[in-house]
Amino acid sequence: MEEHGLHRTELTLMQKLWQIQWIFVLLVCATAGVGFAMLYSAGGGTAGTGNIDPWASRQMMRFGVGMVLMLMVALTDIRLWLRYAYAFYVLTLLLLVAVEFSGSVGMGAQRWIDFGFINLQPSELMKIVMVLTLARYFHGSSIDDISRSLSLIPPLVLLAIPSVLVLRQPDLGTALMLIIAGASIFFMAGVRLWKFGLLALTAIGAAPVIWHFLRDYQKKRILTFLDPESDPLGSGYHIIQSKIALGSGGIFGKGFMMGSQSHLNFLPEKQTDFIFTMLAEEFGLIGGLALLCLYTMILVYGFAISLRCRSQFGRLVGLGVTTTFFLYVFINIAMVMGLIPVVGVPLPLISYGGTAMLSLLFGFGLLLNVYVHRDVQIGRRGAGEEL
Amino acid sequence: MLAGGKLALLSALVGRMYYLQAIESERYATLAEDNRINLRLLPPPRGRIVDRYGEPMAVNQRNYRVVLNAEDVKDAEAMLDVLGSIISIGPGERRRIMRDIRRQRSFVPVTLRENLNWDEVASIEVNSPDLPGITIDVGQSRHHPHAVDTAHILGYVAAVSENETGNDPLLELPGFRIGKSGIEKIHDLALRGTGGSSQVEVNALGRVIRELSRQDGQPGAEVSLTIDLGLQQMVSRRLGDESAAVVVIDVHNGDILAMASTPGFDPNAFNKGLSSDQWKDMVSDVRSPLTNKSISGNYSPGSTFKMVVALAALDKGVITPKSEVFCRGYIELGDAKFHCWKKGGHGVVDLDKGITESCDVFFYDTALRTGINRISAMAKRLGMGQLSGIDLPGEQPGLMPTHDWKRAVMGIPWQSGETMIAGIGQGYMLATPLQLAVMTARLVNGGFAVVPHLTGSVKTSGAVINNNPVSQVSMDLSPAHVALIRDGMESVVNDPRGTAFNARIDRPGYEMGGKTGTVQVRRISSAEREQGVRKNEDLPWKERDHALFVGYAPLKAPRYAVSVVVEHGGGGSKVAAPIGRDVLIEAQVRNSAGRGVEQPAGEAVGSGA
């Protein structure tokens, strides 16, 4: 069953560089550029002014570091990632546990570990590592294996442990993203739909129990989502102000750096979770749609790369990263427009924040890596055979 | 399939975006403007109050206050320690300040102390390097430059109390003051003006970012009074510490030229806020400094009422100028004995002698024959027993009793003895000093029912509204009868037998006429009467007689009428008449000299002694 390397198996560095999807890189840069502009606007105090500090400058620095990381990841051998996927998983899991004990509390939740040079948020990293881990597991499974329900238990456990840890922080949004992204990898690996149905029913049955474990502020957020006007100065404030900002932007927007809602601080968290609102206020429907177009193009590239890949591992990694990216986009935008509860998910490549940016670029690095190594054949048990 | 699902979800986002930004856009745009724009009210400057010559009586003064900007001060307690070494800050004041700092948002300045004097301002400014976050701020506060001299006319302004909030949004401004009494209250709306507004852009915390537009309000109207400030000050000072009231009125048009009530109070202290001790002192003072006695003091008119009795009797034909009564020093009615003030009696008394020498027996007899209803009716024609309608709050109507009144109020019939003592202005009847001045004016102005008023004109930026005195109504009195009364009043002052002869004015052309009154406030027992009535000087203050005087000048062409009431002052001739004389001299001197030139008062006073 093991086929030995084709001529493409071993590529030189120059060849690999040539294989990178530079248009995709360009799209990522363009999106990040939109983010810099918005952070510049958010940095200004009053309407009509912007400032590169405190956000845009640091974001640019991180993006630079992230780009280097992305290209480095893209150029490494894909089999390395397969081989060390579980090791990464364990490492990230340890970090998550460490957060439990030493993490600093921000926004009422323990999420960060201070490493000195960077405030690491292990849950963000876990989103990508989860993709790697599950892809590794299903890469080693045949169709027959997957159809056996018992074989689904190990990956379910792999998914459940970090999800529970993240939920305990408590970070509902990230936990949901982990679960949905994980589930979509299960699906893409070939797990039957009815099994999802069964699981979903179980989840609904467990909802009251989960409700019991939710923190008060999480319960409040869900209740507020159902009726934001019930508490206009409390939890509903964010979403009401966000809708006002969006709506008042109209079709063409108020102009760059002219958003009254964001510049007068009516809009909370405008540099992080609600940055899309600010963009839509200043550039209107046109601006919002343009950004969505950029995102869609990135997604299309992601799918195209994934489907083009010959190895199961590469395909799953590509689809997993793309799905994770989609979930970022959808959950954030749906949240600021009041379609789903406020769960605290950043807008990818645009929101201010280091770990999310680095994790995502790490993910994109893997995606590019998958494209570079699209024709590499990988054995069931990893890459050991070739080396 | 997965891609399809994602596409569907993305389409949902686009749909939602279209809904919010295209369809509902207008609604949200309005909400965003509501968020952003805040309307600030600009208080208009309060209108000035000036006297008849334009001399300022109530103005707005620069009020220097020291404020603390909490956001620039890290340790407010330490800052107060430093400031406390420059201007003393009491523990209560300190508690209030710390409470304000905690309550208000950090960018709202906290007022530490208002009404700083110049020395305090200077020493704070000099030490400003040690006081970061502490600044001097200038506001406006109401100031009455003649404080106590004009207190009862102008009233005072103070902070709006809870039950006074009305439609005017100005009332909700912190620190806004409204008139609480006097002219400040009567003309409060005109003086207040209308507020301007400033549209400002605010951020989510309410901090002002910039001003978008401004609409200036209308400053308060300037109210000019009929008061002659110089005369007012002279009157107020002449009364000094006495518990007394004086009203000076123009007999022809009802202009109040001076109206004093002593002791007074400092209206500026009310504006700044009184301490509870200060308030208690004022309320418990037996001389009631807060009451405007000129309009709210109810006094028995005493002998000043005798003109009314005489006029009523003449009017009804009960007496003629020739009618005579024999005074033995008392008169008997049934078992009761009614005494004249002169122990030995006046002998044969006619109307002229009755008024001149203030013979009580003559008026007991005349009153009894005239009847209380007729006397009260005449008193009302002269303005007593009812509100004069003067433009001040808190006026008292006084009281002119009738048979019906007593039956209604006390449920027992009127007694003849009560008519007799009414004849000398004692008993149930009550009048205010203002009513006494109006009565005098109506007696000497040729028979017109003048109405007293204080407001000359109200001048807004657009127009001047003159307070023209209502057209004078004739009182339909017989000129011959009125002339008889005036002759009597002339003799009271200028006939050597007159009760006010010692207080006469002998400066040619300035002579006055008048009538004294001494009102007993205690019962004199028959035992005391036999041993000799105790002198006022020997009695406790509260039991001494009230001293009254009403007068007018000049004698031949009356222009000014005055009424004087000195509570527990003693005799009308000795105490009240000299005050009336000094006031009438001053009024005439000021008029003949033209405005603003004050003659040395000593010369005029000396001439009367």
Image (cartoon, coloured by chain):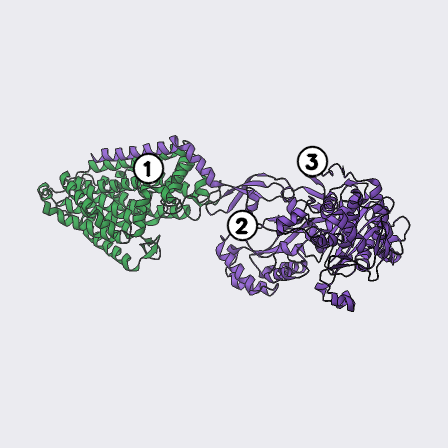
Chain colours: A green, B purple
Q: Which mark is residue B162?
A: 2
Give the labeled residue for mark 1.
Answer: A27
Whole-number angstrom distance, CA of label 3 to CA of label 2: 33 Å
Tell me the quarter of the image containing the N terminus of chain A. top left
Residue for point 68% across, 56% down: B266
- The secondary element bearing badge 3 is classed as loop
Q: Which residue is mark 3?
A: B463
Say if labels 1 and 3 share a chain.
no
Dot 1: chain letter? A
Q: Is residue B21 above or below residue A228?
A: above
Label 1 secondary element: helix
Q: Chain of mark 2?
A: B
Is residue A311 in view from this perspective?
Answer: no
Mark with earlier residue (3, 2): 2
Q: Residue furthest right?
A: B508
Q: As shown in the figure, which amino acid type bears the numbered disc 2?
A: Glu
Who's the residue at 44% across and 37% down the image?
B31
Marks 3 and 2: same chain?
A: yes
Q: For this rendering, which residue is in front, A22 or B465?
A: B465
- Mark 1: which amino acid? Leu
Cα separation between marks 1 and 3: 72 Å
Counting from the top left corner in percent of width and height, residue B455 is at 71, 43
Q: Is residue A242 left or right of residue A81?
A: right
Mark 1 or 3: in front is: 3
